[in-house]
Amino acid sequence: MSLGLPSRAYDLQMLDRPTERARDHGWVYGLPSGITSEQWPLDPVTGYPLMHGFTLLLPDDYRVHGEDIVAVSFFATAPDHNDGGAPDDPEIREAVMALPSHPRLSRMTDILDYEYAALLLTKAEYDGAFATPPAPLALATADRPRWLDVGGACAFFEAAAPYARKMFAAPPRADLAETRAIALTPRASDPNAGKGPQDEHVRQNPPTGYQPYYYYVGGVPSRDNFRLHDWSKDHAHNHLGGTMRPCQAVPEMSPFYIEFEEYFGGYNFGGGNAQLDFKDMKFDWACG
């Protein structure tokens, strides 16, 4: 199947209520849907299940893997397992990688060698029952991650800085199934919809026509000359496609990507944000 480039980008909002799948575009925190416990990806670093961050129902113009693949679930290293660099235990890694896996599982590693994963879901899987996390490997020696006892939402809220707690209207329940709904809204104006993000000074691929969200008055780079383009001023921090606002350098990605903040699933990005390219299965994050 050949899918054209999307003509729109979408803002993503984490709502102040649990998901209602019949009307929402996915959910943050909670559990993935439509998979078995055996298909839940384990962390090759610790042997514990990776934490479910979000499941997003993709609009038609972002179903780059075919019309039957309607959603993507993202899994991450638990924040309390993410501190200073990943240890390497070949026995744990080999045991995890030898296990059966979901047929559309992709694994990714960050600059600190921590692990992340994405699952591409069919409609039946997206509509399916919430999964139960698997038991950790018997080889696992790391401390049990907090989210396994109280859920990702509650675990993040307990440890979050004050500015991040403000993203919640009320403290989340201590429950593995506690979710927050995702609302998806087309951006009124985004000239980068359908264009792969890249930095024109360090790009490795042909130019895509992508333009940054800022400019410098008179073309002279300086703090005093820094300005935002009018079209970018109302863009949400969490979004699908379009203009990227990474905390540091722009990672070169396809137009089919999601940019999200720490609270959009409960991660440790050093106060920064992250990007997931679900077409080419690339992942990147940078601290704030």
Image (cartoon, grey):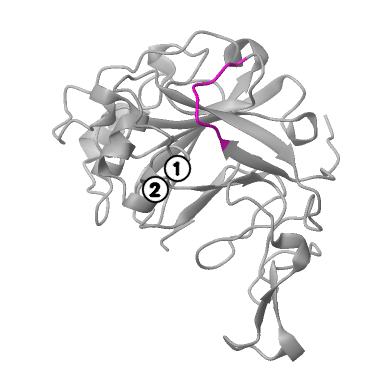
Q: In this view, does 217 lie to the left or right of 102?
A: right
**Overall secondary structure of the magenta section:** loop
Q: Residues within 10 Å of mark 1 (few under 14, many from 20)?
A: some
Q: Does the magenta stretch include residue 151?
A: no
In the rendered structure, which segment of residues is drawn in magenta? 14-21
List x then y, in percent, for residue 178: 40, 21
Q: Do the residues labelled 2 and 1 touch (CB within 8 Å)?
A: yes
Between residue 75 and residue 46, name the one nearer to us: 75
Q: Under tag 2, what secondary structure?
A: helix
In this orientation, does residue 50 appear? no
Q: Is residue 143 left or right of residue 94?
A: left
List x then y, in percent, for residue 170: 38, 32
Q: Is residue 23 left or right of residue 269?
A: right
Kindly identify which numbered label has been placed on residue 164.
2
Q: Under tag 1, what secondary structure?
A: loop
Q: Which amino acid does label 1 sit on?
A: Met
Kindly identify which numbered label has been placed on residue 167.
1
Between residue 281 and residue 166, name the one nearer to us: 166
